[in-house]
Amino acid sequence: MKITLLGTGSPEAYARRASSGYLVEIGDDKILLDCGGGVFDRLLQSGRMPSDITHLFFTHLHTDHMMDYARLIHGAWDEGGAPLPVWGPAPIAGINERFFGIDGAFAHDLRARTELPQSQEVWVARGGTIPREWPQPQITEIEPGFNYQGDCWRLTTCRATHAQPLLECMAFRIEADGKSFVYSGDTGINDDVEALSKDADLLLHWCYRPDKAEATEAMRAMTPTPGEIAAMAARNDVKRLILTHFRKSMDDEATHQAAHASMKAAFDGPASIAKDLDEIIL
Ligand SMILES: [Zn+2]
């Protein structure tokens, strides 16, 4: 399994880090976990095309995890790609309908591209056929506990502690060839995420707060620090830990060094801070 970190940042506008998105390649499958702002461009920079994606799963629907969704779907459609299967919590079906439905935000564009004779001529010259269908991603709304069996891989989910009750949020575990990769989504440490992380070859965990940052009790429960995440990884026998979802304010040298020190104190295995376009092979 090969994992490419397409977006390792937060909602902030930040050239160094796109918002959340992670590509997992197993056999012929290219599985995208989240699709935040900037992930589309990172996908192209990594040498892949929108239509290369075979599966898209959303942990939750904060915009920094789905802002490039419409661009990905439209881009894959423009290439003539097959309808993309998409899994995510509600209201992903309604969001999709409001983008690509018959009365959706892009209806003017899709009507013009599929009905204008000149546009049809361009489409046929690019190898397409008429009539041209509108984008039709195959949406499945899911809840924590959902499992998916791929060709030679399996995805399991659990509830992440994040933006409930306003947004359902999940963490994901993917297993293939005896290897396991856990992506926390955005979450506080909870029993379900700990169980999901057990014995993982790689835990990619969000980190939104340095160890010494002041925070209210509610915020502390929601935003584990590098030291807390490393301790959780250690007690669950995780093999390798990478922190992601870094904010601009956490990206200076001193904060990185402090995070490395906190992780080293609590966790024996390799531990690092994600960078956009990093690749990991398990
Ligand atoms: Zn979030």
Image: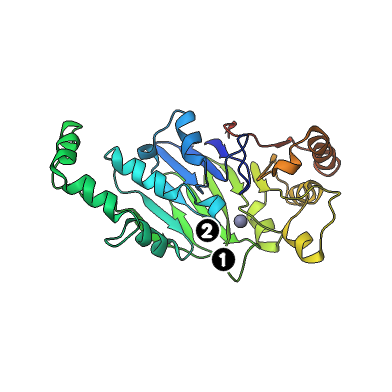
Q: What's the residue at 51%, 49% (across, down)?
A: 34
Query: Which amino acid type is shown beneath numbered disc 1?
Result: Leu
Secondary structure under tag 2 reads loop
Residue behind label 2 places its C-beta within 8 angstroms of ligand 1? no
Q: What's the residue at 71%, 37% (across, down)?
A: 273
Q: Are marks 1 and 2 in contact (CB under 8 Å)?
A: yes
Which corner quadrant of the image does residue 141 belong to? bottom left
Residue 252: % across, % down: 77, 35
Query: Which amino acid type is shown beneath numbered disc 2?
Result: Leu
On screen, 195 above or below 112? below
Calculate the distance from the C-alpha at mark 1 to the C-alpha at mark 2. Answer: 7 Å
Q: What's the residue at 57%, 46% (across, down)?
A: 20
Which corner quadrant of the image does residue 163 belong to? bottom right
Q: Residues within 10 Å of mark 2 (few under 14, many from 20)?
A: many
Q: What's the residue at 40%, 44% (across, down)?
A: 72
Residue behind label 1 places its C-beta within 8 angstroms of ligand 1? yes
Residue 145: % across, % down: 53, 64
Q: For mark 1, what is the residue? A: 167
Indicate left or right for 29 with 239 as reference. Answer: left
Q: Residue furthest bottom?
A: 165
Q: Nearer the viewer, residue 117 or 242?
A: 117
Q: Which corner quadrant of the figure contains ligand 1?
A: bottom right
Q: Nearer the viewer, residue 139 or 255?
A: 255
Secondary structure under tag 1 reads loop
Residue 134 in view here = no
Mark nearer the N terminus (1 vs 2)? 2
Residue 61's mark? 2
